[in-house]
Each structure stands twice: as structure tokens, then as C-alpha cells.
């Protein structure tokens, strides 16, 4: 009986510790709901995720929603252990938002009309910048676009 009690205790502790993980989660398109606009995430070329130090995960369908929430003071931005956006060229793949390269262009048809796409490299972004006649934005600039 003591063995079962100990095993149960270990299971309980592992569940508690596991639930406090501050790790990103994959975006589940067609299932996950945007924290800001409450619409279901559908377009895999767009999306974002914030993870707090305590493991709370917020998911978004568009840069518009993501940055409006980020700038809302709902959570202190210093409490986010992960700030992630979807790489436009690798749909559904989250990359570090602070290191990404952003393109703003009228041709970008994002779910909430944010008209911003994120790219992992400047070279990738530059190809679309010429094609779409867009404007390059660094992290600080894209954040201030939605203040």
C-alpha cells in the first residue's frame, strides 16, 4: 500500500511541475482560439504566441491581435519568457519575434488585416519586399505600429 501511495505522490508532483512549464506550444489551427479577437486560428502563414514565466500561453491569429494584446498591459511584457511569431515561409513554425524580420504591405492578406508577415531571415523578407513593394520593420518598429 505504501508503494502505491508513493507512486501516486510522484505522479501528482510531476503533474504539478509539468503544468508550470514555461514552454511554447504548437499552434493548433482549426482548434485554437485567438486570445484577443476570439476567432479560430485558420491561416498557417500567420499567428503568434506569448508564454509567461509561469507557463501561461496566449495564442493569436494575426500580428494585429498579437501586438494589441502585447501592448495592452494585460501582462507585463517583462513576464513573457517566449515571444513568438509564425514564419510566413514555413507555415505553422514559430520563431523568436524579437529576432524576426517583418514586412508590411497591402498585398499581405492576414486574418485580421494586420498586413504584416514575419520572416526568419532578412534575405527571405527582401524577396517579398521587392515583389510587394512593402516596408521593412524591425521588432521595435512593428511593436510601435500597434500602440
Image: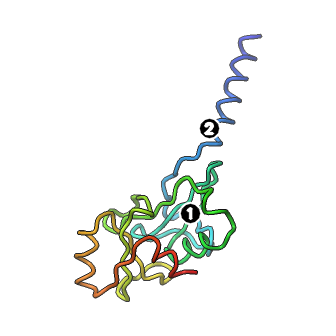
Give the quarter of the figure containing the N terminus: top right
Q: Are marks 1 and 2 in contact (CB under 8 Å)?
A: no
Dividing the picture into quadrants, the one containing residue 100 is: bottom left
Q: Secondary structure at mark 2?
A: helix
The residue nearer to you, when weighing 86 against 97, is 97
The residue nearer to you, when weighing 27 against 18, is 18
Q: How many marks?
A: 2
**Side (left or right) of 5 relative to 129:** right
Q: What colour scheme was applied to this rendering of the protein?
A: rainbow
The mark found on residue 136 in the picture is none
Q: Residue at x 32, y 85 (%)?
A: 134
Give the quarter of the figure containing the C terminus: bottom right
> Where is residue 121 drawn, in percent x and y?
29, 64
Mark 1 nearby-residue class (10 Å; few <14, some 14–19, many ≥20): many
Dividing the picture into quadrants, the one containing residue 34 is: bottom right
Image position of 73 with respect to 95: above or below: below
Q: Earlier in the sequence, mark 1 or mark 2?
A: 2
Label 1 and label 2: CA atoms lie apart by: 19 Å
Image position of 1 with respect to 52: above or below: above
> Where is residue 128 drawn, in percent x and y?
26, 78
> Where is residue 130 drawn, in percent x and y?
23, 83
Q: Residue at x 58, y 47 (%)?
A: 22
Residue with the mark numbered 2? 18
The mark found on residue 59 in the picture is 1
Q: Secondary structure at mark 1?
A: strand
Q: Residue at x 61, y 71 (%)?
A: 69
The residue nearer to you, when weighing 51 against 28, is 51
Image position of 18 with respect to 103: above or below: above
Q: Residue at x 48, y 84 (%)?
A: 113
Mark 2 nearby-residue class (10 Å; few <14, some 14–19, many ≥20): few
> Where is residue 109 drawn, in percent x and y?
40, 82
Amino acid at each position: 500500500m505504501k508503494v502505491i501511495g508513493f507512486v501516486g505522490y510522484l505522479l501528482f508532483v510531476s503533474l504539478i511541475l509539468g503544468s508550470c512549464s514555461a514552454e511554447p506550444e504548437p499552434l493548433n489551427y482549426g482548434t485554437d482560439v485567438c486570445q484577443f479577437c476570439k476567432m479560430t486560428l485558420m491561416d498557417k502563414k500567420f499567428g503568434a504566441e506569448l508564454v509567461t514565466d509561469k507557463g501561461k500561453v496566449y495564442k493569436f491569429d494575426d500580428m494585429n491581435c498579437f501586438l494589441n494584446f502585447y501592448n495592452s498591459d494585460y501582462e507585463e511584457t517583462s513576464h513573457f519568457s517566449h515571444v513568438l511569431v509564425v514564419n510566413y515561409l514555413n507555415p505553422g513554425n514559430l520563431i523568436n519575434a524579437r529576432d524576426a524580420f517583418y514586412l508590411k504591405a497591402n498585398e499581405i492578406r492576414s486574418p485580421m488585416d494586420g498586413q504584416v508577415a514575419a520572416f526568419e531571415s532578412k534575405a527571405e523578407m527582401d524577396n517579398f519586399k521587392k515583389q510587394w513593394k512593402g516596408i521593412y520593420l524591425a521588432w521595435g518598429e512593428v511593436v510601435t505600429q500597434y500602440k
